Amino acid sequence: MKILFVIEYRGNAGNTHAIANYIRVGAELGHEIAFHGPSQPLVVDGLYLPPDKQVARFSTDPSAFDRVIYLLESKLHRVNRLQEVALLGTIPREHRFILDADGRYNPFTIVDGYDRSHYDEAERAEWLEFYDALSDRIIKPTIVPSDDPKVTTLPIFGFDPALVIDPETAPPKQYDILHVGHNWWRWKEVSEQLLPAFEEIRGDIGEIAFLGLWWDAVPEWAAELDLEPAFRVEAEKFRKLRIQIKPPVPFTDVIRTMSTGRINIFTQRPFLQHVRHLTLRYFEEFCADTIPLLMLEDDLAEAVYGPAGRELTLPGRVAEKIMDALQRPDHYREIVEDARRYMAVHHSYRRRVEELVTALSD
Amino acid sequence: MKILLVTSVEPWVRSVSTIDKYVSAGRELGYDIAVYGEPDPELPSMTFTTDISDVDLALFVIQVPSDLPDMPELARLLDSVPRDKRVVVDLWGRYNDTIRLEHDFNHLEKLDGHLGWEWEEAFRSVSNTILQPALKPIRPDVESFLFHGYDPSAVVRNYDSAREAAAAWSKAGPAEKPYGVMYVGSNWQRWDQIRSFLERYAPVRETVGRACLIGWDWGARPDWAIELGIMGIDTDPAFLADLDVDIWDGCSHDNAAGHLSKAKFAPVFHRPLFRHLGMVTVRTFETFYADSLPVLMLPRDFVEAVYGPAALKLVPGDDLAAHLTDALEHPETYWDAVLQTRSHLAVNHSFDRRFQELFGLLDRRMTARGPQ
């Protein structure tokens, strides 16, 4: 099958990374998968990688594809008008799909009086109107089945054992605790659970760092968009706890960077956890040479990682779990290996591509 | 028959006048014809619709990218109207290789964000039938359909004879015709021709009368053109001031002929791209509505093919000043050419005729394709 992904290509975003994996694994299975748009060659250390080393493939020719998937995140990504005409005029409606990556195809929902599915009902109506015009088929990257006949639930992201960092070649450990991800609807979890725990054990642990955008300050444009709660930060608390803030890393460097931490803490946006969306980070954490500790409910962790998942959850025991992992790294490495074995069976990209092709063939 | 005109219409610019004629002429002929979109209070006489059910023919009349609807309307339209009922009318020669002539062009990414291949793929994805208002389109898969037309009922003042017309024209005083020459159209890729015209008109300015330009950006090169480095919107305020040229901002489409009637002469210019492609425009025909003598600043073979042989009288030779002076001295022969040309246009380029040509063309294509 030939599948074209229309997505806002961002080198430091999880969805872009996942589709790059589909392109690579899809080719091994005989499928042609590409990003829509002009070629954006991967540059490493200032040098263009040769064609055979390029992770991503790009195309602006919709007629070369059987299916198109519009991967929509927090905004209605649009290609330019003429390319939009070419896409819509070439790929018939029954072959157009929407991958609802940020859970916009849901009722208006507010989680914990804080994170929300949409700004308000009017914004939801605008999204639904756009979706309805574009396609009858919605793919939700969740493990929860849907009774909506338009919806196919399909974990889109996967685990690639080939990406697991060998401890022998892993970069040196710089941090005891690392959090890699942007500050986007994370503050409640961070301020209410993580920071108090860090404070409790701060004298007993080494460096802590948060890598990503918007941990240092709320972006200037957030207030204008009424999005200040999504980016809330308390720089003074970070300073007091000696938490380093570092810039984001491109998707090609995420796993290696996470390997510089003895522990990586995984957080997920509350609304996406509420609708059980599996993001790429669920799997990337387990490719790094680290001990992932998860801000997830036990049942969800087990559903994704198997029984070992329960051993890695943090809610209600953050300080205790961090100290235990730092003191018994070999024990935790075994737990992580169990989770990896489970994911290799249930969440491989090979399986994901096959599931996707089956869903698109219906 | 339900016909949808898919395009953007604004009262002041581009081909709104022709679109208005298609709607009114089409409805008189019994077609259910409307412009796709919500009603525009600035165009109260134009019929709009968002009902895209059972459309028999959707004409995508394209000049600029925004002539194509935005989402979600775009998807609804393309999904609801089958491909074989969609036709692209490419008014600006977008469906060609990239052309550069003087400062003119058919594709320019820095202006509208689109490259040549994007125009091609977009048009091909909309329809197999691509029409251009050119006598002989360059590409073999494009057919000639002049699109713009002539509505005899829009003529500002009709005459029974050239003598009557010439007498009225010669007698008109400053209150009726305060200008000697007037051009209605915005400053877009025509400055070189306008300047050349005015330079050659200058020696007889006192005799002919004051010149007037009505349209956007004649007074000064706009800031956006300076920022983007877009040429072809040049102007020379000092030169225009020296010649005492009056400059007005743009006028709405239904006032163009009325304004032109306030001048003795009304030149017709086509931008370099359109001259190269042999394309017609709104003003190709609309200028003949005015109570003014058209001055056809166009190639003679093009003039004869579109306007008929009588119109050659209205094409000045190398000596524009002599042409204008001769017309002032012998107006009857020029008005005879105008009246003959109006008759030719009424017979060959009416909107009724355009509908016949369009349906004939589509029938031929359908027959050539055979049963689907």
Image (spheres, coloured by chain):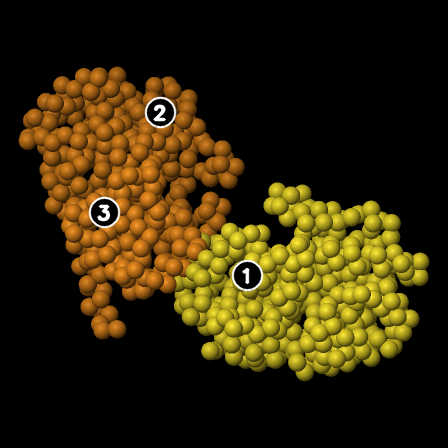
- Whether residue A312 is situated above or below residue B132 in the rendered picture: below
- Whether residue A102 is situated above or below residue B38 in the rendered picture: below
Read off the residue under disc 2: B247
The colour applied to the residues of chain B in this rendering is orange
> What residue occupies the far front of the structure in this picture?
A113
Judged by depth in the image, the label closer to the viewer, 3 or 1, is 1
Q: CA distance from mark 2 to mark 3?
A: 31 Å
The circle on residue B22 is 3
| Residue A184 rendering spot, x and y as whole percentages | 68, 55
Label 3 close to label 1 by CB (< 8 Å): no
**Secondary structure category for the residue under label 3:** helix
| Residue A42 rendering spot, x and y as whole percentages | 64, 63
Q: In which chain is the residue bearing label 2? A: B
Q: Nearer the viewer, residue B51 or A8?
A: B51
- Whether residue B208 is situated above or below residue A152 in the rendered picture: above
Q: Nearer the viewer, residue B174 or B73?
A: B73
The circle on residue A107 is 1
Amino acid type at circle 1 is: Pro
**Secondary structure category for the residue under label 2:** strand
Amino acid type at circle 3 is: Tyr
Q: Are marks 2 and 3 on the same chain?
A: yes
Q: Nearer the viewer, residue B169 or A214?
A: A214
The colour applied to the residues of chain A in this rendering is yellow
Please name the residue shown 10% across and 37% down the image. Answer: B340
Q: Are marks 3 and 1 on the same chain?
A: no
Q: Quadrant of residue A351?
A: bottom right
**Secondary structure category for the residue under label 1:** loop
Label 2 crowd (10 A; few <14 / some 14-19 / many >=20): many
Q: Is residue B299 left or right of residue B345?
A: right
| Residue B88 rendering spot, x and y as whole percentages | 31, 56
Please name the residue shown 33% across and 22% down the image. Answer: B246
Q: CA distance from mark 1 to mark 2?
A: 58 Å
